[in-house]
Image (cartoon, grey):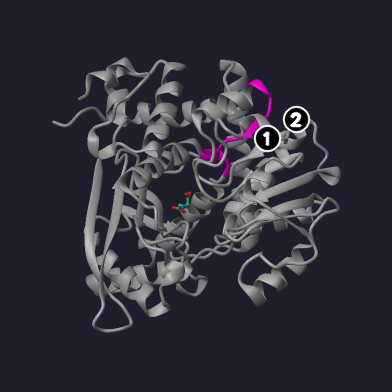
Amino acid sequence: MDKSVEQSDHVIPEAEWDSPMFNLAQQQFLQASKRMDLDENIRKRLLFPQRALITSFPCRKDKYSEVETVFGYRVQHVLTMGPTKGGIRYHEDVSLGEVSALAMWMTWKCALLQLPFGGAKGGVRINPQLMSRSELQRLTRRYTMEFVNMIGPDKDIPAPDMGTNAQVMAWIMDTYSQQVGHAVPEVVTGKPVVLGGSKGREEATGRGLVYLIQDAAYHVGIELKNATAVIQGYGNVGRNAAAFLEQLGVKIIGISDVSCGLYHEKGLSLGAIDDHIQEHGVLKGFSEAEEISNSELLELKCDILAPCALQNQITADNASYINCRLLAEGANGPTTLEADRKLRERDIFVLPDILGNAGGVTVSYFEWVQNTQEFAWTLEEVNNRLHNIMVEAFQRTLLRSQRDDVDMRTAALIEGIQRVSEAKLLRGVFP
Ligand code: GLU
């Protein structure tokens, strides 16, 4: 292993892992590990994923003579805790480093929530918006075949992430089931309900984030009925978070998607926005609000700012201008290390991603449990259990941050790392 790894502060990753996002995940881990009594061997062990598949494979386009070569990944960070778990991302920037960072965060997320999984993530470097439904289906089935031996209900269980959805999970489930000769719904989560998906899974990430916002708002003294919120991203997470916040009486003054940001100081009407999206596909062109840029959106004065889009949004450049009291991270990796430092100085309370967006994988866990028991829960049962798990994890993280005098992100990481480390020490080294 590289000598610099031992010095702990400035890891120079092995060349194949060298990427800004993986470096962020490693540095977060190393910083948290300095605040705890982490076994030195385990610290080195956890810095890199245990398994990573890199594949290039052909995807036939609708025009039969055209075949595109695409790149796909599946990374399993820790196999100690049970099967590995994590979504599959379809995005044109996907790389080994990005998928590895996301896999590492899944490990801490599952351990923090005390789910019996290690972390994994997958991705294909394409823009799904530029593909037809039949191209996406062919791509998904071929990608599944590339990593069919890595996945399974007891091995590694994929789920949706950015650019994928319940339909993609249905194709993965079908492809896997064709290989083993019988239906295996429990090989993926986030499926359509008719194929064994869990009630409440679709909106679980947004719902979980809002459960946490309720507790965090109480902690920092924000009264939600008079509060304002800005949501970056209007995909599955952002849209649901906005809707649940609106139900609590929060005024949503800003939202955005890839096309633009929207602002209205009196509050946006989500119903009218959904109608507009239904017709036009994107936020752009919505006439009952002011159009603003992404950077203007992030700097709006509000009580709650929820980044629910891409990584690397709150950085050294804009952290000083973030104007909220509570930062609720629905996205994975939206905040850089330097930005974290500035937010801390400015006393902005952070619900860190591995806690903030953990509602999704928590209901994925429920889905897997329901599938393996062949028994379906009611929506009320799902939401009650989700609420209990999220609130307990929030309280545990808050307590840790107060006791160890660390910020919420470090506290959440310590909680996760501690659990994985204990399990690793108990299992020992083979042979
Ligand atoms: N992709 C989601 C995440 O980042 C969900 C993963 C899952 O449900 O397994 O947490």
Q: Residue at x 55, y 34 (%)?
A: 315
Q: With respect to residue 305, does 369 lie above or below? A: below
Q: What stretch is highlighted in magenta?
A: 345-356
Image x and y of residue 349, in percent: 67, 30
Comparing 293 with 217, the one in front is: 293
Q: Residue flagged by tag 1: what amino acid is it? A: Ile
- Between discs 2 and 1, the one toward the N terminus: 2
Question: Counting other residues with Cα less than 10 Å from the Cα at mark 2, is it few (<14), some (14-19), or many (20 or more)?
Answer: few
Image x and y of residue 27, in percent: 41, 27
How many numbered marks are there?
Answer: 2
Image x and y of residue 22, in percent: 37, 37
Question: Counting other residues with Cα less than 10 Å from the Cα at mark 1, is it few (<14), some (14-19), or many (20 or more)?
Answer: many
Q: Magenta includes 347?
A: yes
Residue on which disc 1 sits: 322
In the rendered view of the protein, which quadrant contains the C terminus?
top left
Q: Residue flagged by tag 2: what amino acid is it? A: Val
Q: With respect to residue 369, does 34 lie above or below? A: above
Q: Residue placed farthest to the left in the image?
A: 431
Q: Magenta includes 157?
A: no
Q: Residue 24 carries which label?
A: none
Image x and y of residue 363, in percent: 53, 54
Q: In this view, does 348 lie to the left or right of 404?
A: right
- The reply to whether callout 2 and callout 1 are in contact (CB within 8 Å) is no
Q: Residue placed farthest to the bottom in the image?
A: 64
The answer to whether the beta carbon of the residue marked 2 is less than 8 Å from any atom of ligand 1 is: no
Comparing 90 with 69, the one in front is: 69
Q: With respect to residue 277, does 305 lie above or below? A: above
Q: With respect to residue 403, does 286 lie above or below? A: below
Q: Residue 220 carries which label?
A: 2
